[in-house]
Amino acid sequence: MTSPRPDLAELELNELEIALQDRDCERFHARQLYRWIYRHGVTEFDRMTDLSRALRARLESEFSVTTPKVVTDEVSADGTRKFLLELGDRRRIEAVFIPDTPATAPRYTLCISTQVGCAMACGFCLTGKMGLVRHLTAGEIAGQVRVLAAATGLLDQPFNIVLMGMGEPLHNYDNTMKALRMLRSEHGLAVSPRRVTLSTVGIVPGLERLAREPLMPNLAISLHATTEEQRNALVPPNRKYPLAAILDACRRFPLKKRNRLTFEYVLLEGVNDTPEDARRLVKLLSGIRAKVNLIPLNPAPGIPFERPSDARVDRFAQILADHHLTVSVRKSRGQDIRAACGQLIVEGGVRKTAAQQLAVLMR
Ligand code: SAH
C-alpha cells in the first residue's frame, strides 16, 4: 500500500519537522527546506544543494511540493500584473502584483485569492457572480505568494499582502490563517502580519476568532452601505451578520496602539454615494478607530451599477474628512487587464449560482 506523498507546500514548519522526524530524518532539515521553497523559490529536491544526495533522493520518494502554475501573466499600462494560476485539480484563480512608486521608496503589494470563486454574491462584484467552487488550501494560498514573489523579483525584498483577490477569507478561516503562519516563518519569506491586510464582508464569528489570534493581520471591513436595508441588498451576508453586529464586533476588536480598522466603501452612483450616505457613515463609525477607503466602482459587463464622477467621489470624501475621518480613495489599478477590485473571475467551473451557494451559507 502506498499512501500519497505528503505535500510539503501544505505544512507549517513544525508540521514539517514532525513529518521528517517520523521518517527518521533530522528535524533541522525542515528549516533548510523552508528556505529553499519560500526564500529561493526552489521546489525540486534535486536542486537543494546543501542537502546530501541521499537525503534528496529520500525526500523525492517520500514527499511532493505542489506549486500553482502560471498560465498567463498580463501586464497593465500602470505596471500592475495579473497572474492566472492553475491549481493541482486544474481549477484556476487569479492573483495580482501591484507596484507603487511613492516619493519615498517603492512599495509592492501582492493581492491574493482565498477561494476559487466566492459565495458572498455582492451585487457589484464579478467574482461573486461565479459562486463558490471551492476553498483554497493553505498551501495554495501561500503558494500564490511564492509564485508571484519569484516572478516579480520580490523573494528578498519586503512586500505587502492583501487578501483581496477572489474569495472571502473568513469563510475559509483555518486555511487562510495557516497560510499566514507559513508565510510568516523567519526561515521562509518572513512576512510579518503587520504587512498583511485581510479584507472581509464581516462574518461576525470569524471576526471574533480573529480578535483572539496571537498574530493578527490588519483588518479591512467591506462596509459599502449605511443602512441595514441597503446593505442587505448589496452585500447579501448582511442578512445573517447585520451592519450593527459587525460594527459591534469592530468596537470590541483589540486594536494595537496607533492601529486602525479600515472600512472599504464601494461608491455606486446614485445608490450609496449621496451626502446623506456620507453623513450616516460618519455616525456609524463614531467611537471606532477607523479609516475609510473609498473605492469608486470598477464597472464590468453584467454589473448593474455605475461608477460615480470624480466630483461625486470628492464630495463624499470631503464630508468624511470634514468630520475628522481619515479617508483615501483607492486608485484603480490594472483596469485595462481586468485586474482591478471586483474584476477577478475565471470562466468555467461554475456549478451553482452565487445565490444558491449563499443560501447554503445562510442556513
Ligand atoms: N471578500 C473580501 C475580499 C473582496 S475584494 C471582502 O469582501 O472584503 C476586496 C474589495 O473589493 C472589497 O471591498 C470588495 O467589496 C471590493 N469590490 C468588489 N467588486 C468591486 C468592484 N466592481 N469595484 C470596486 N470594488 C469592488
Image: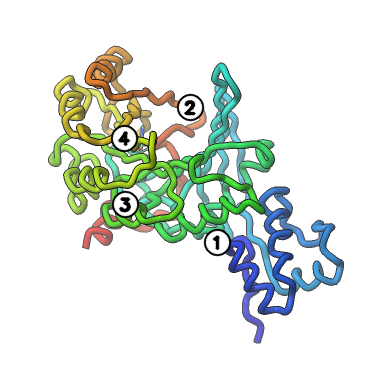
10 Å neighbourhood of mark 2: few (<14), some, or many (≥20)? many
Whether ligand 1 has any atom under 8 Å from the Cβ at mark 4 is answered as: no
What residue is shown at x 45% (from left), y 47% (from top)?
Answer: 347
The numbered disc on residue 248 is none
**Sequence order check: which comes first, mark 2 or mark 4?**
4
What residue is shown at x 32% (from left), y 34% (from top)?
Answer: 264
Whether ligand 1 has any atom under 8 Å from the Cβ at mark 3 is answered as: no
**For numbered disc 4, what is the local secondary structure?**
strand
Disc 4 versus disc 1: nearer the observer: 4
The numbered disc on residue 89 is 1
**Sequence order check: which comes first, mark 3 or mark 1?**
1
What residue is shown at x 16% (from left), y 24% (from top)?
Answer: 279
Rendered location of residue 135, percent (x, y): 43, 58
- Residue position for label 3: 207
Q: Calculate the distance from the C-alpha at mark 4 to the C-alpha at mark 3.
A: 14 Å
Residue at the far front in the pictured view: 257
Residue 262: quarter of image: top left
What residue is shown at x 63% (from left), y 55% (from top)?
Answer: 67
